[in-house]
């Protein structure tokens, strides 16, 4: 489903990602953990080209973009349409109601019929437990509710993979659960997901695989059980100890 | 009343011509040039924000020239200067061109600041659902930038209403030119100019109310 080959990303002289190779199968849930500055968010953002890789290639489904040469501007939205992104700070469109936020992609980008998009958006919002908030503006919703709208908005484009960039980090502790619950449901339904998070319990319960990143490289990847109980590298061990 | 009968009569007889000058010329000039100016402003702002050096350079030069020279001088160049190189324009079209260029330059800075004030996350959210740059701009960024720019743009609009009085010097028969003519024939400059001033003020008061209404309308999605 996702294939990343020799991916590199520089910000000026700073090498943020050094030769990342990664393969993620359909329906897999992969959690990326690591200290701040490890490049985990940058890697995630490279998967939907919010950061354009300096070198290497990203493949999602059958669309492969190689950044060693110039990449056509038309292909970038194509790749983005295959991914859905859930942001740390939600980034809902504040001038649109919850349902308008969810309909926006299908209507504007895919040119879907408004009536049809409305029905689908309503279904999605119902699924994330917001059937009674369709016509609320983001400022009228709690953080947890906004983030669930964010998930519904990403789902509305029928992406091949959902990317989560620390989706619960900006939330009050009592609101984290409702967002994680929705994410778990998606995972159970077979959604392919890549999640950058500090929620180790979520990783343990839901992830098929956990990736530990540090200083721009993948240090190790393993099943959650193995990685958490029996880390192979010192740096992984140090990081996990710090969390305790 | 402290006006003599004669003065009262002058006020009465000059009111309609002045109002006509205001409605037919001052306000139409304001409305037309503001619309053209806004289009110019959005184009200029986008050009300045683009990473094509030629585009942003042209936009920068345009804004610099217009902001760096007096409006009166610009109007003189267009109306009195251009005929020397064979371009002769009537007063009204000259004023349209002059004011539009002016509004375009000043408003472009407002629009640019408003676009920059929208968090980067909004662009990214748009891109993340597959939007192109024009789609994200049109659907996500400009509607939010519009809300931010209403107060400063309303300010520009109200200034523009009053600036149109400068069109008098290039012979546009707008309200102030009418006032000058009436003052000259009646020898009552104080009376007539105060009357004109009051009409400008009344117009601007109405516009301020419209601004308030517009701000309230656009603020409906913002927590207060």
Image (spheres, coloured by chain):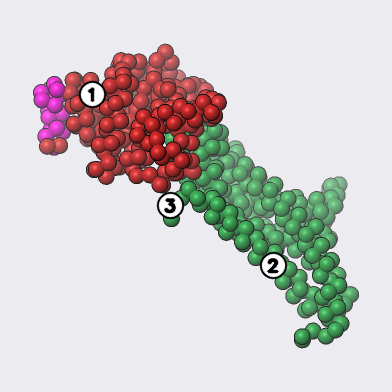
Chain colours: A red, B green
Residue B20: quadrant of the picture: bottom right
Residue A142: quadrant of the picture: top left
- The magenta stretch spans which residues? A225-242
x then y, percent, for residue B216: 54, 55
> Looking at the picture, does residue A212 appear above or below residue B92?
above
x then y, percent, for residue A44: 33, 28
Q: Please name the residue that numbered disc 1 is placed on.
A: A207
Q: Is residue B200 left or right of residue B84?
A: left
Please report, as a chain letter, where disc 1 is located.
Answer: A
Nearest the viewer among B132 and A235 is B132
Q: Which mark is residue B202?
A: 2
Q: Are marks 3 and 2 on the same chain?
A: yes
Q: Please name the residue that numbered disc 3 is placed on.
A: B223
Residue at 29% across, 23% down: A187
- Quick check: can you spot residue B13? yes
Question: Disc 2, disc 1: CB below 8 Å?
Answer: no
Secondary structure beneath label 2: helix
């Amino acid at each position: 489903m996702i294939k990343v080959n020799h991916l590199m990303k520089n910000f000026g002289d700073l090498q943020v990602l050094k030769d990342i190779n990664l393969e993620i199968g359909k329906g897999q849930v992969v959690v990326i953990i690591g200290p701040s500055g490890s490049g985990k968010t940058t890697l995630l953002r490279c998967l939907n080209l919010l950061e354009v890789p300096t070198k290497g290639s990203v493949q999602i489904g059958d669309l492969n973009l190689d950044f060693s040469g110039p990449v056509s501007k038309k292909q970038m939205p194509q790749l983005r349409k295959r991914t859905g992104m859930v942001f740390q700070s939600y980034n809902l469109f504040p001038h649109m109601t919850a349902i308008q936020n969810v309909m926006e992609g299908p209507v504007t980008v895919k040119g879907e019929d408004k009536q049809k998009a409305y029905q689908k958006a309503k279904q999605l919002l119902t699924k994330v437990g917001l059937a009674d908030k369709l016509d609320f503006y983001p400022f009228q919703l709690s953080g947890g509710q906004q983030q669930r709208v964010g998930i519904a908005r990403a789902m509305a484009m029928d992406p091949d993979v959902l990317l989560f960039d620390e989706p619960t980090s900006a939330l009050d502790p009592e609101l984290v659960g409702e967002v994680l619950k929705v994410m778990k449901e998606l995972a159970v339904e077979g959604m392919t997901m890549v999640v950058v998070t500090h929620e180790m319990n979520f990783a343990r319960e839901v992830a098929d695989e956990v990736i530990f990143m540090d200083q721009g490289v993948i240090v190790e990847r393993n099943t959650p059980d193995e990685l958490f109980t029996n880390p192979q590298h010192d740096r992984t061990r140090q990081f996990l100890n710090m969390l305790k | 009343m402290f006006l003599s009968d004669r003065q009262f009569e002058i006020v009465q007889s000059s009111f309609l011509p002045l109002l006509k000058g205001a409605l037919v010329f001052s306000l139409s000039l304001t409305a037309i040039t503001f619309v053209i100016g806004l289009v110019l402003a959005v184009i200029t702002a986008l050009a300045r924000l683009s990473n094509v050096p030629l585009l942003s350079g042209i936009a920068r030069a345009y804004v610099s020239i217009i902001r760096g020279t007096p409006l009166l001088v610009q109007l003189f160049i267009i109306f009195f200067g251009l005929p020397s190189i064979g371009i002769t324009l009537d007063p009204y079209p000259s004023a349209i061109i002059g004011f539009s260029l002016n509004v375009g330059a000043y408003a472009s800075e407002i629009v640019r600041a408003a676009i920059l004030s929208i968090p980067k996350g909004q662009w990214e959210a748009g891109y993340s659902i597959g939007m192109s740059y024009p789609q994200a701009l049109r659907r996500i960024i400009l509607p939010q930038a519009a809300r931010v720019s209403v107060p400063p743009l309303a300010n520009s609009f109200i200034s523009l209403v009053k600036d149109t009085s400068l069109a008098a010097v290039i012979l546009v028969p707008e309200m102030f030119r009418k006032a000058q003519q009436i003052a000259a024939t009646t020898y009552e400059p104080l009376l007539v100019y105060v009357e004109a001033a009051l009409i400008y003020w009344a117009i601007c008061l109405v516009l301020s109310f419209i601004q308030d209404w517009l701000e309230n309308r656009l603020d409906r999605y913002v927590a207060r």
